[in-house]
Image (cartoon, rainbow, N blue to C red):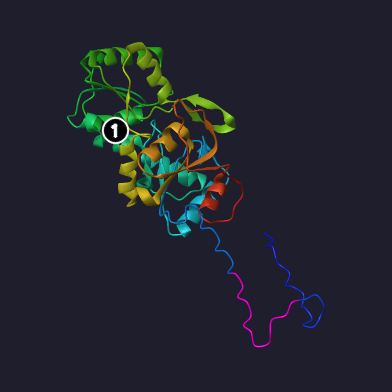
Amino acid sequence: MTRATTDAPAAVDAGAPGTATAPMGAAAPERAAAPEPAAAPLADVDTVLLDLDGCLWFGEALAEGAAELVDALRASGRRVGFLTNTSNSRAVRVAAKLRRLGIAAETSDVVMPVEVLAEHPRLRDRPRVWFLGPEAVRQMIGELTPLAERPEDAELLLLARDTAMTYHDLADALHALLCCGAMLALNVDPRVPVEGGRMLPGTGAIAAALSYASGIEPEIVGKPSSGFFETALRRFGGTADRAVIVGDTLDSDIAGGAGAGLRTVLVGVPVPSTRRPEPVPDHRVADLAGVWALFGGERSEAVG
């Protein structure tokens, strides 16, 4: 980067006509101090929570600058955690995917809804659950609370994104919901961004179908639940006033982070919000290099 330079003023002949000279012995006038450079907006942040889908990666493709951003944040001494609404996997697999794509990560670096489910009030009394979701997650649910053998035996319907779901599965879930009257969703993200700019239906799309058919709204485990952000801060030893969430979704990342008292950064062009008024991020950036600029690093292109 080329730095701007200021030419030194040309010397002035003390006796040249048309120039003012200070009387001999008089003190030279003091020069005004140069203004202090503005501090980077996130310079005081010590805990950074990064969203994954649509922010650090798109399906199996790492976002440009993702590994460099994580490395730079860690090198600056900040705590970095990955806060994801992924509902069809486990933290150990998500951490393995991060490593495979080039970002060092331990299982404990990843916070996701299924991993904090045991702390949700709905699970406190270990209700019989009818689970609509992938088999890998079903096994973990069974370790937390009994699984109902029939939809009509359910005391709670629990939802996760299941790419192998059939119409029969959806019908059983509706029957369970009408019998028990309570639905808990690991998240309500309407869609999931993947490679090539495509979108897949998210858990929120499944929850919306069941809500429309039953008139029952879901409770949420993951983002934008304030409890989810509070769990993440406890995990990483951070406080809300010195933490930031970086993500691509207004209704989960930005609304949830603001509700929990964190600062918020929106990356790229978001999915349109369904909230009114629409959540407003503290900062908008075009890319992950723009995120690093907010911490005082080299800037690519930041917006707002």
- Does residue 34 show up magenta in the picture? no
User: Percent from the top left, x then y, of residue 243?
Assistant: 39, 49
193 to 131, vertically: above or below? below
User: Percent from the top left, x then y, of residue 232?
Assistant: 34, 44
- Main secondary structure of the magenta stretch: loop
Q: Disc 1 on helix, strand or loop?
A: helix
Residue 230: image quadrant is top left
Q: Quadrant of the C terminus?
A: top right
> Quick check: 287 left or right of 256?
right
Q: Which residue is at a point 27% across and 15% down the rendered structure image? A: 176
Number of other residues with Cα within 10 Å of mark 1, as a class: few under 14, some 14 to 19, many 20 or more: some
Q: Amino acid at mark 1?
A: Met
Q: Is residue 28 visible?
A: yes
Region in magenta? 20-32
User: Percent from the top left, x then y, of residue 252?
Assistant: 42, 33
User: Percent from the top left, x then y, of residue 166?
Assistant: 41, 15
Q: Which residue is at a point 21% across and 16% down the rendered structure image? A: 153
- Which residue is disc 1 drawn over? 140
